[in-house]
Image (spheres, rainbow, N blue to C red):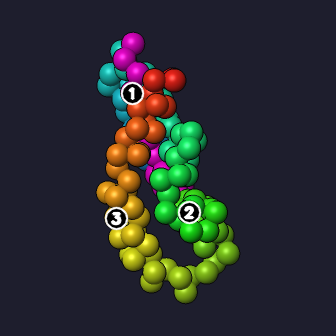
Amino acid sequence: MTRIDLIFYSGGGGHRSTANALSQVIKKRQPNWQPKLVNIEEIENIEHADMFYKMTGKNGNDIYNLVLKKGWTFLIPLFPLLRTLAKANIRQNSSELIALLESHWRKN
């Protein structure tokens, strides 16, 4: 069996649903592959590479989900800016993120 990790981001729930759907398609089309869903938040020490966590003590997913839960729709116009900042954070911390993913895969 070939194990395939599908890494997803749980902000809002759509990413998890997409990962689940992709997993089901993989199982049907590639029976020798074993897809595994991996929530990026559960990767050890990943919060150290999250600018939102560094600034607020909460990860980006938690902040996004809180905005949705509370109905703070007035903040929605900020989402494109936050997404741009998150992408810049990923680029800036790519070496650290790669090391954390490599460590995760070695352990698992």
Question: If you read the primary sequence from the N terminus, does the residue marked by circle 2 or circle 3 appear first?
Answer: 2
Q: Mark 1, mark 3: which one is toward the viewer?
A: 3
Picture coordinates of residue 75, whole percent (x, y): 53, 82
Q: Which residue bears the numbered disc 1?
A: 4
Q: Mark 1, mark 2: which one is toward the viewer?
A: 2
Label 1 crowd (10 A; few <14 / some 14-19 / many >=20): some
Q: Which residue bears the numbered disc 3?
A: 88
Q: Which residue bears the numbered disc 2?
A: 54
Q: Residue at x 37, y 33 (%)?
A: 25
Left or right of 36? Residue 63 is: right
Region in magenta: 1-15
Relative to 88, does residue 42 appear above or below in the rendering? Answer: above
Residue 36 lies within the magenta run: no
Specify the amino acid type for callout 1. Answer: Ile
Specify the amino acid type for callout 2. Answer: Lys
Question: If you read the primary sequence from the N terminus, does the residue marked by circle 1 or circle 3 appear first?
Answer: 1
Please tell me whether mark 3 sits on a helix, a strand or a loop. Answer: helix
Q: Mark 2, mark 3: which one is toward the viewer?
A: 2
Question: If you read the primary sequence from the N terminus, does the residue marked by circle 1 or circle 2 appear first?
Answer: 1
**Based on the displayed image, in which of its 4 quarters is residue 45 positioned?**
top right
Specify the amino acid type for callout 3. Answer: Ala
